[in-house]
Amino acid sequence: MAVLTEAGADVHDIEQIVIRGRLTLGIAVEVPEGRDLLKEVLLFGWDQGMEVDFDLVSSTPTVSSRGQVVTLLGPRLTPAEIGVATTAIAEAGANIDRIIRLSRYPVMSYELLVRDGDEQKLRAGLLRAAAANPGLDIAIQREGLGRRAKRLVVLDVDSTLIQDEVIELLAAEAGCLPEVRRLTHDAMAGSIEFESSLRTRVRLLRGLDEAAIERAWTKLRYTPGARTFVRTLRRLGYTVAIVSGGFTVFTDRLRDDLGVRHAHANELEIVDGSVTGEIVGGVVDRERKATLLTEIAAQEGVPLSQTVAVGDGANDLDMLTAAGLGIAFNAKPIVEEAADASLTVPYLDAILFVLGIRREDVEAADREGDDVST
């Protein structure tokens, strides 16, 4: 900078990157007429042990305001997988302005800032690349303030926040698991109506006692990365909510255990310590989940454009569509097709990388023990 100042040069652009300890600094400068900056910078580089190279340009390129953020995720992200993504970008006539590594663990992930090109062709090509490569997930979002202003995350529970379907844990205790599992599968795939299916399944639980409910709770398994995901979001100031087609007897405990602010689910009717086979009040179905997302956003003063919804089943579709960003997590095909982004990796905290949060920041926050009080 001292050499440039002495030469009377103007800085038009500057960027620096460090890869494995090697620093690369690029500066676009305008040099006054008649001034030989080349000799002075080369001399400075030789004195400092730096490699210096020049590229003469007539003007500084104007950067287009249009941009897409493409996030690549996978267990390894091989050269072949990265190659199919970058080929799709090139075929859409787009250009990669920047690549940032977001994580090495629990998955590899990179964020690419892509500009210009045909947006529809870009999206279609990247989705085809992901579909043809089972180890590769690709999320595409518009670059801009809206992407970085997300403030509310609403999560489905069964097969999203947790690995299980709660009603199947209860059905195992009641001795009706095969029938309940079949009905659950059909409802999540969207082949049968959710509310009637749920009421049929709940009737099969009639007579189940509170001790059996407690045993089912002890068998519940969080999705890998669930605690890290919620803890990190809270540290970053996000509001986290859970909405479930399951039951409050479980979601209330999950809310307290994870420290999420809102929890909504169906209420099992329990009389004299036994399940009656009925639900108290209305059912949290596909439409109700979207309504709850809207209501929670209003309570928190968050525009819908700044919300994120995560789910896996057909009853999550309206919620994913209503949110500013809808993410299908290990979802049924009908949900993957409708969502803004789809992840097939088994780690819930991989969603952090889609939001642009780096693994190093997550680990630093854990080491510092930031306050995550509710």
Image (spheres, grey):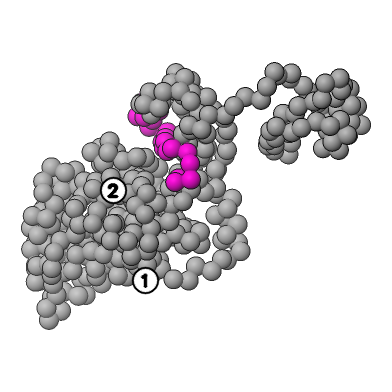
Q: CA distance from mark 2 to mark 1?
A: 27 Å
Q: Amino acid at mark 1?
A: Asp
Q: In the rendered image, is residue 169 in sight?
A: no
Specify whether residue 366 is painted magenta: no
The residue positioned farthest toward the front in the image shown:
33
Mark drawn on residue 322: 2
Among the two numbered marks 2 and 1 on one chain, the one whose residue lies closer to the N terminus: 1
Question: How many numbered marks appear?
Answer: 2
Note whether 312 is above or below 73 in the view shown. below
SS for dot 1: helix
On screen, 350 above or below 95?
A: below
The label on residue 243 is none
Residue 256 numbered tag: 1
Q: Secondary structure at mark 2?
A: helix
Crowding near pointer 2: few (<14 within 10 Å), some, many (20+)? some
Which residue is rendered at x = 31% and y = 40% of the image? 339
Is the C terminus in the top left, top right, bottom left or bottom right quadrant? bottom left
Horizontal placement of 148 versus 317: left or right? Answer: right
Question: What span is in magenta?
Answer: 126-147
Please say whether residue 144 is one of the residues in the magenta stretch.
yes
Q: Is residue 137 above or below residue 225?
A: above
x then y, percent, for residue 30:
76, 27
Q: Name the image quarter holding residue 251.
A: bottom left
Tell me if 53 is positioned left or right of 298 in this view.
Answer: right
Q: Is residue 233 visible?
A: yes
From the top left corner, tell me how far across and down residue 187 is, in percent. Answer: 15, 48
372 to the left or right of 340: right
> Which residue: 82% across, 37% down?
1
Name the residue: 27% across, 36% down.
337
Question: As shown in the figure, which amino acid type bears the numbered disc 2?
Answer: Ala
